[in-house]
Image: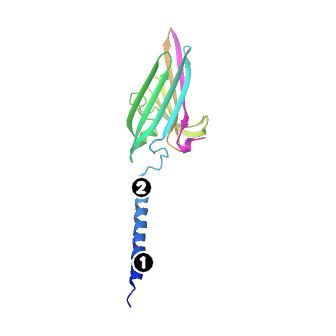
Amino acid sequence: MNESPVGRSSRKTLIIIIIAIIGVTAVLTYWFLSMPSRYPWLFKGAYADYQGETVALFIPVKAKIHMEVLDFNKTHVQLFIHTKIESIITNETDKIGWVKLEDMEKGKIPLWEGDYSPSRTYEEQLYIENIGLRDCTVYEYTNNGTIRYYIDKETAWIISIRIISTGTSFNSTMTLNLNIDLTKTNIPQLKG
């Protein structure tokens, strides 16, 4: 029995639709599987603003940091980092650099010069205003002082930087404690 041209045409159309659906599904599956799901902040334009202030020898010190994702691939993220330290004098720096995704989880980003290995790693809960209580992995680096990066366990993003530095001035020892906390972000999982 011969099939009518209309029946053959609709079967071809159905086969083409099925092939197209399979092709689109394969492309979307590849795209989703190739994206690092551990990093919900991994999108162009993801940003975080940080701020902190303290007093050292009766002199106020303010720190502001803006960190933004410019680009990324499977293994690295390109960051723009603007740092502004205000005190008697103001110091501003802009840096753009590629960072391994695994290094982001350890706070190894191009904020300050130097190649540090953590002297200590531990877990801690940290409360950040407008975000709430977060479970963190803390990476502590010691080199002419101590820097602690509080990495949110859910997002693998820095939510706080703590700087502790001790020095001698005018025959007395002074300690600088500066907490630089996340204040604003467009990363959905870090909004309070």
Give the camera-side residue of 1 and 106: 1
- Identify residue type, mark 1: Ser
- Chain part drawn in magenta: 171-192
The answer to if 188 sits in the magenta stretch is: yes
Residue 89 at x, y = what percent?
47, 16
Mark whose residue sits in front, 1 or 2: 1
Rendered view: 134 above or below 92: below
Q: In the structure shown, which secondary structural element does the residue marked by tag 1 occupy? A: helix
Residue 140 at x, y = what percent?
48, 31
Q: Mark 2: few, some, or many residues within 10 Å (few <14, many ≥20)?
A: few
- Identify residue type, mark 2: Trp
Residue 80 at x, y = what percent?
42, 35
Distance (Cα) linking label 1 and label 2: 31 Å
- The C terminus lies in which quarter of the figure? top right
The answer to if 42 sits in the magenta stretch is: no
- The N terminus lies in which quarter of the figure? bottom left
> What residue do we see at 49% from left, 46% from top?
40
107 vs 188, left or right, is left
- Which residue has dot 1 on it? 10
- Which residue has dot 2 on it? 31
